[in-house]
């Protein structure tokens, strides 16, 4: 089975368990699935989803030179104006918090 087929197979199994109203343990027992294998794929699919959630970010220069700032516009409509004096680490902290 190719990797894409395995992924689709396990996505289907995980969805079936969610809709089954059974505990994961009971679902695995009823379907002959190793409990650890279920959790392996569940974690793997969750972590790969997190990696693939990219959003474009647009930076604009401040037009007000008396208060220099960085304006960050996210694709989801959030707009943040941060002081230009922030360090890169502080800007990263704000980006992480806003996403």
Image (cartoon, grey):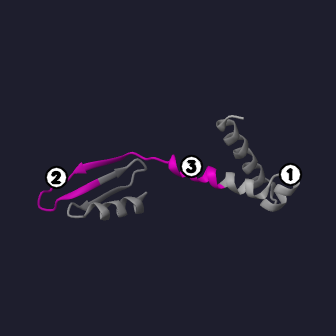
The residue wearing badge 3 is 49
- Identified at 74% across, 54% down, the residue is 38
> How many residues crowd around disc 3 within 10 Å: few (fewer than 14), some, or many (20 or more)?
few
Task: In the rendered structure, find residue 72 and report the number of the disc placed on it.
Answer: none
Q: Secondary structure at mark 2?
A: loop
Instruction: Compare residues 39 and 72 and report the one nearer the observer.
Output: 39
Instruction: Compare residues 51 and 59 and report the one nearer the observer.
Output: 51
> How many residues crowd around disc 1 within 10 Å: few (fewer than 14), some, or many (20 or more)?
few
Above-or-below relation of 9 to 79: above
Task: Point out the residue furthest to the left here.
Answer: 66
The Cα atoms of the two marked residues, 1 and 3, are separated by 26 Å
The residue wearing badge 2 is 63
Above-or-below relation of 5 to 97: above
Left or right: 60 as drawn, with respect to 28: left
Magenta span includes 6: no
- Identified at 21% across, 59% down, the residue is 69
> Where residue 24 sits in the image (x, y, percent)?
78, 60
Q: Which of the marked residues, 2 or 1, is nearer the chain's N terminus? A: 1
Q: Quadrant of the C terminus?
A: bottom left
CB under 8 Å between discs 2 and 1: no
The residue wearing badge 1 is 32
CB under 8 Å between discs 1 and 3: no
> Where residue 78 sits in the image (x, y, percent)?
38, 55
Find the magenta span and give its range.
43-71
Q: Which of the marked residues, 1 or 3, is nearer the chain's N terminus? A: 1
- Identified at 19% across, 53% down, the residue is 62
Q: Of tags 2 and 1, which is closer to the observer?
A: 1
């Amino acid at each position: 089975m190719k990797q894409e087929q395995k992924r689709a197979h396990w996505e289907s199994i995980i969805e079936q368990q969610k809709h089954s109203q059974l505990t994961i343990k009971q679902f695995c027992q009823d379907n002959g699935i190793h409990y650890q294998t279920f959790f392996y794929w569940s974690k793997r699919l969750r972590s790969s989803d997190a990696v693939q959630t990219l959003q474009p970010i647009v930076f604009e220069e401040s037009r007000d030179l008396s208060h220099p700032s960085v304006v960050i516009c996210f694709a989801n409509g959030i707009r943040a104006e941060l002081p230009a004096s922030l360090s890169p680490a502080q800007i990263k902290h704000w980006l992480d918090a806003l996403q």
